[in-house]
Amino acid sequence: MRLFDTARRAVVAFSPGPTVSMYVCGLTPYDSTHLGHAATYVTYDVLHRRLLDRGHEVRMVRNITDVDDDILRVARSRRVHYLDLAAAEIRTFDEDMAALGNLEPWSEPRATSAIADIRGFIGTVVDRGHAYVADGGVYFDVSSVAEFGRLSRLDPDTMRWFGPQRGEDPDDPNKRHPLDFVLWKPSSPDEPSWDSLWGPGRPGWHVECSALALRELGTTIDLHGGGTDLIYPHHECEMAQSEAATGEPFVRHWMHQAMVRYHGEKMSKSRGNLVFVGDLRRNHDPRSVRLALLAHHYRRAWTWTPEVLDQAEARLERWLTARRGPADARSDPALTAAVRTALDDDLDTPVALAAIDAAVERGAGVTEAAGLLGVALD
C-alpha cells in the first residue's frame, strides 16, 4: 500500500505492523454532519476497511471535541448546557455515519473524559521547558522546538495570517510570540471550569487531541488523519506539543482529506454554506451519497452540485441491477483484485468505481468488490 504523506509531500509506502494505530480528528458537536465531514470520514472508513481486508487489526480512534470555544459559543446562543448540545449532535452524527455505512471506531473518546490526562500532559510540557504560564493560562513556546512549521511548510508570516481564520489569536498580549498557542486558559464565568496548578480553567483546542491520542494509542501513531484545514494550526501544534512532551516522533504518516466546496467556497460552518447528510439521506439512498463522495479522489478538492448526486444514484441503480441479474455470481476475482490494487495506490476510489462500472457492463459479479468500498449491495 502506498499513500500520500503530507509531511513528506509524496506518495510513499505505508507499511504498518499487524496492528495499525490510526487517529482521525473527529466531530466538534455543535451542528449536524455536513458533506465535508462525510467526505473525511468515508475516506478513512475505506482505508480502515482495506487494512482489515489486508489482515491488519485496526485501532482507529476518532475523538469528540465536546468542550472548546465553538461549542460553548453555540450553547450560549441557544441557552442550553454545552453537554446537552453535544449529546444531541453526537446522536445525529452517529446515525449519519451508520447510514453512510461507516464502521464504528475502535474508540471514540471525549475531550471532557481526559481532563486529568490533559493537565498531566501540560504539566510535562511545562516541566520540560516548552511552555510558560501567563495570567492564569499556559502557552506553548514555539521557539523551544526545532522546525516549527515542518508539517505545514508555512513560513511564520503565513502562519500568522492563517491563525485568526482557524481559531488562533496572534495578538493575545500574554503571548511571548504571536505563534505561541494556548494549552490551558481561564474560563469565563458562564463556561465550564476545572482546577489546575495554573488556576481554574479549561483546555485549549490542540492539547485535547494530543492527550487523547497518547492515552489511547501511545507515543507514536501509525497514521493521523483529518481535513486539510487542520494541517495548520491544529496538526502542526499537535505534533509540536506531543513530541515536546514525549521526546518521540508523534506520527509516522500524515494523511489529509481535501475540502468539499459549495457555491464556490469551502463547505464550512463559519460560511454557512452547508449541505447536511441528514437532509440528503431523508430523500436519497445513503449509498448514493457514499458513492458521490467516493467518485472524487480524497486529495483533490471538488464542488458539490445536485448533478453529483444524480450521477451517483444512476451508478447505484446500475450496480443493483447487475447484482440482481442472472450473471451475478457475487464476485469476480479479477475485479476484486483490481479494486484492491486501486485502493493500495493512494486510495484511488475513482479508479475502483470505474473498474466496477466496467464489470457491470460485462455482466460480472460486483457485490464483493462493492463491499470493499463499503457499499452493500445485498
Image (cartoon, helix red, strand yellow):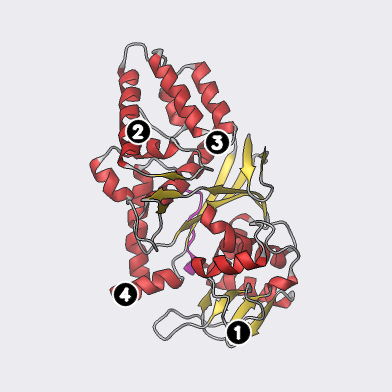
According to the picture, the residue beneath numbered tag 1 turns out to be: 174
Upstream in sequence: badge 4 or badge 1: 4
Type of the residue with mark 3? Leu
Give yes or no for contact between labels 1 and 3 (Cβ–Cβ under 8 Å).
no
Type of the residue with mark 1? Asn
Please tell me whether mark 4 sits on a helix, a strand or a loop. Answer: helix
The main secondary structure of the magenta stretch is loop
Please tell me whether mark 3 sits on a helix, a strand or a loop. Answer: loop
Separation (CA) of disc 3 from disc 2:
19 Å
In the displayed structure, does residue 276 sit left or right of residue 203? Answer: left
Segment colored magenta = 105-113
According to the picture, the residue beneath numbered tag 4 turns out to be: 77
Query: How dense is the environment of label 3, judged by Cα within 10 Å: few (below 14), some, or many (20 and up)?
Result: many
Residue 117, image x and y in percent? 58, 69
Upstream in sequence: badge 1 or badge 3: 1
Against 47, is 29 above or below?
A: below
According to the picture, the residue beneath numbered tag 2 turns out to be: 312
Rendered residue at 64%/68% (across/down): 157
